[in-house]
């Protein structure tokens, strides 16, 4: 995609967004075409917001009926004006996804909007309430669920009074440690399954071994494994998952824990489901009254699907969802287990779109879910994901594109706008979910989002390892507030993480802080394998574990006018020495308090550093790969750079404002205005 085409798509999408906003504003004072309410009836006309006095007409009961009424309207008269469906407040239980297909499309002049009735809060729940709780042994409460016993339902999440509860787990805190990995080639098993030795007593021959799951942490992701055999005398466990898929990137004496065994149900807030008996066990928190508590388990896997036909070039177009709460969707575990994938890239989402154009999800809440929140998959172009709150997430927030490279124009996912979203409390099930994951996709705008409390990367862009051509180009990542990620659980992450050759991609005006990895790799700006032709400018990064900026390998990136401060290790890292220019780093302020400036490999000189200001607040002498500044400059590096206090207003508390007399300005540094970072008030959005 060319940059000009990107600008055209953004312009069209902004126009659609403005039209949608006008429709929303007008709808608050106007009647809708159809209404949906919890006291409605799908046999009625749907034309009234409330049932009439004699109970013969009123709103529909379901979104599906409203959708079908629009189909009938289009068949009879065609679309001659925008169509609005207003949904009254209340909870709507849906156990199959609401599906929108090409025949449900609007047009540019006559879009279709499904929205909350003014002042109402419609909740679409994929869960079922569990009732009939009785006191069990000790502190436990139990409930019988016939659908579980008969094999019609098996849930993996439980929520009490709107809060996620933890599956029974061993150990309760910290982790077990693998005693010794047993690679497939050393194990006498024809299927070459994963196996390891455990420390005596950590894994036992439990009666419910078939339902137990072992979560094995790897460097930057996790495997979720089913047990097929345990030998307690030899302290070995064998899994259903192929070993080759599991043991790559596993650290020595890797951490793991066990879920969903009855023996692990030993503290408040935990639960356990016995598949055979259909009984769920729960240990309430101290202040929970189980005679009044609302306990919900998810039944549905997805709640909304936009189903275009990419191969037939029949797309879902000009539809907006606005003001809904979508909650309680589950996840499944295949019989062969889950070997683990970076960024949980193959997981689906509660809201799934394929072959979707100029559609939107606005002002929605997506919560209590098992996978990703929203996925714009194959062939999605010019869509908007705006001002949503996505939280309590099994994996990550929003995915754009797919892992495979699209071959035809209609297969490309491009030109989408993701702005003003709150994405937080991710990785609740699948640990390495990403806030926003842009795969093989170009020309997207990811801006003004707040992303926090994840175990892995905030925003990830690109999916090519190396210098092969990549379709992930011309992506603009700006004004995002990314913080409190990693949380010491996984490694090799970034506030913003990139992969592959990405001309036209820009990372600017992002505020990134508090990135804490388990071992190595807690970086703020991280250009990983093959990242090339990327501009990183006007970002503020502080309080990282391993570095403010790190380039593994790549070519000709520009790192300009950033503030990189307070890494607990070195402030800037460069890993692989290559024969071409790695990057240009100029007019940055690099600020530390530990005497560690440059990390890893700086020997071959294939980089450009100049006009930077360096300072160590601890008054230590600053070294440049073991050299003083004058020695470093004698080698032709940082010729115009200086060591001086930039005079930040209050750096210890995250205020990196510069006074007019700062020496940084003499180097050409320009003030970074982050007053608009993160989600904006409604009137200030696009």
Image: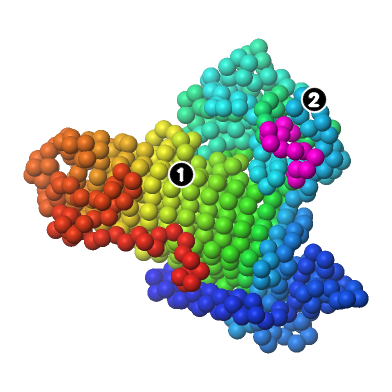
Residue 50 appears left or right of 529? right
Q: Mark yes or no: residue 342 visible.
A: no
- Give the residue at the far top of this rendering: 233
Q: Which residues are magenta?
A: 282-295
Which residue is identified by label 1?
485
Mark 2 residue crowding within 10 angstroms, few (<14) / some (14–19) / many (20+) = few
Seen in the image, is 57 located left or right of residue 670?
right
Report x, y in % for residue 49.
77, 75
Task: Specify whether residue 317 is painted magenta.
Answer: no
Mark 2: which secondary structure? Answer: loop
Q: Is residue 290 magenta?
A: yes
Where 147 sits versus 373, above or below? above
The residue depicted at 61 percent of the width and 62 percent of the height is 364
Q: Residue at x 25, y 38 (%)?
A: 593
Q: Nearer the viewer, residue 365 or 289?
A: 289
What secondary structure is the magenta-colored segment mainly? loop
Q: Position of residue 275 (x, y in %)?
A: 79, 35
Q: Nearer the viewer, residue 527 or 525?
A: 525
Q: Nearer the viewer, residue 51 or 172?
A: 51
Residue at 36% in and 42% down: 544
């Amino acid at each position: 995609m060319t940059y000009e085409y990107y600008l055209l798509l953004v312009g069209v999408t902004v126009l659609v967004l403005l039209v949608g906003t006008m429709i929303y504003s007008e709808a608050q004072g106007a009647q809708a075409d159809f209404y949906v309410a919890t006291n409605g009836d799908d046999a009625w006309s749907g034309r009234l917001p409330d049932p009439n006095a004699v109970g013969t007409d009123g709103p529909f009961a379901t979104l599906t009926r409203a959708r079908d009424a629009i189909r009938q309207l289009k068949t009879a008269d065609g679309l001659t004006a925008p169509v609005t469906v207003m949904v009254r407040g209340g909870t709507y239980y849906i156990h199959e996804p609401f599906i929108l297909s090409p025949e449900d499309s609007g047009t540019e002049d006559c879009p279709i909007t499904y929205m909350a009735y003014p002042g109402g809060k419609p909740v679409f729940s994929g869960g079922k309430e569990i009732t009939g709780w009785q006191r069990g042994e000790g502190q436990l409460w139990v409930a019988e669920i016939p659908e579980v016993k008969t094999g019609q339902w098996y849930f993996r999440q439980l929520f009490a009074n709107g809060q996620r509860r933890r599956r029974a787990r061993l150990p309760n805190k910290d982790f077990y440690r693998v005693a010794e990995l047993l690679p497939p080639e050393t194990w006498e098993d024809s299927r070459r399954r994963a196996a390891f030795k455990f420390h005596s007593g950590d894994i036992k021959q439990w009666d419910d071994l078939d339902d137990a799951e072992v979560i094995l942490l790897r460097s930057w992701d996790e495997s979720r494994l089913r047990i097929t055999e345990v030998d307690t005398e030899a302290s070995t466990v064998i899994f259903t998952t192929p070993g080759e898929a599991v043991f790559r990137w596993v650290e020595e004496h890797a951490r793991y824990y066990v879920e969903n065994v009855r023996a692990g149900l030993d503290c408040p807030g935990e639960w356990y489901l016995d598949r055979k008996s259909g009984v769920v066990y729960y240990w309430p928190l101290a202040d929970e009254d189980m005679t009044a508590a609302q306990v919900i388990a998810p039944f549905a896997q997805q709640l909304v699907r936009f189903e275009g036909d990419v191969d037939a070039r029949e797309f879902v177009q000009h539809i907006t969802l606005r003001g809904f709460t979508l909650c309680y969707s589950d996840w499944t575990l295949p019989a062969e287990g889950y070997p683990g994938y970076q960024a949980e890239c193959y997981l689906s989402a509660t809201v799934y779109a394929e072959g979707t154009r100029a559609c939107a999800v606005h002002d929605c809440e997506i919560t209590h879910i098992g996978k990703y929140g929203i996925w714009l998959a194959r062939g999605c172009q010019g869509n908007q994901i705006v001002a949503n709150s996505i939280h309590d997430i099994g994996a990550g927030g929003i995915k754009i594109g797919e892992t495979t490279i699209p071959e035809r124009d209609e297969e490309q996912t491009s030109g989408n706008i993701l702005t003003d979203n709150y994405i937080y409390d991710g990785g609740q099930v699948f640990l390495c979910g990403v806030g926003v994951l842009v795969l093989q996709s170009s020309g997207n705008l990811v801006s003004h989002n707040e992303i926090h409390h994840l175990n892995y990367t905030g925003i990830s862009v690109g999916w090519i390892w190396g210098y092969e051509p990549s379709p992930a180009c011309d992506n603009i990542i700006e004004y995002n507030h990314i913080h409190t990620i990693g949380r010491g659980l996984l490694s090799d992450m970034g506030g913003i993480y990139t992969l592959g050759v990405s001309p036209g991609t820009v990372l600017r005006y992002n505020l990134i802080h508090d990135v804490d990895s388990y071992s190595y790799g807690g970086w703020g700006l991280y250009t990983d394998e093959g990242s090339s032709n990327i501009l990183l400018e006007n970002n503020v990064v502080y309080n990282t574990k391993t570095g403010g900026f790190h380039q593994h390998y790549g070519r000709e990136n520009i790192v300009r006018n950033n503030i990189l401060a307070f890494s607990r290790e070195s402030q800037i890292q460069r890993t692989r020495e290559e024969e071409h220019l790695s990057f240009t780093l100029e007019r940055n302020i690099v600020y530390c308090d530990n005497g560690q400036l440059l990390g890893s490999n700086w020997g071959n000189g294939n980089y450009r550093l100049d006009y930077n200001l360096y300072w160590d607040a601890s008054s230590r002498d600053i070294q440049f790969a073991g050299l003083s500044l004058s020695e470093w400059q004698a080698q032709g590096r940082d010729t115009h750079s200086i060591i001086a206090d930039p005079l930040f207003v209050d750096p210890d508390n995250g205020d990196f404002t510069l006074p007019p007399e700062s020496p940084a300005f003499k180097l050409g540094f320009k003030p970074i205005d982050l007053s608009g970072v993160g989600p904006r008030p409604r009137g200030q959005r696009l």
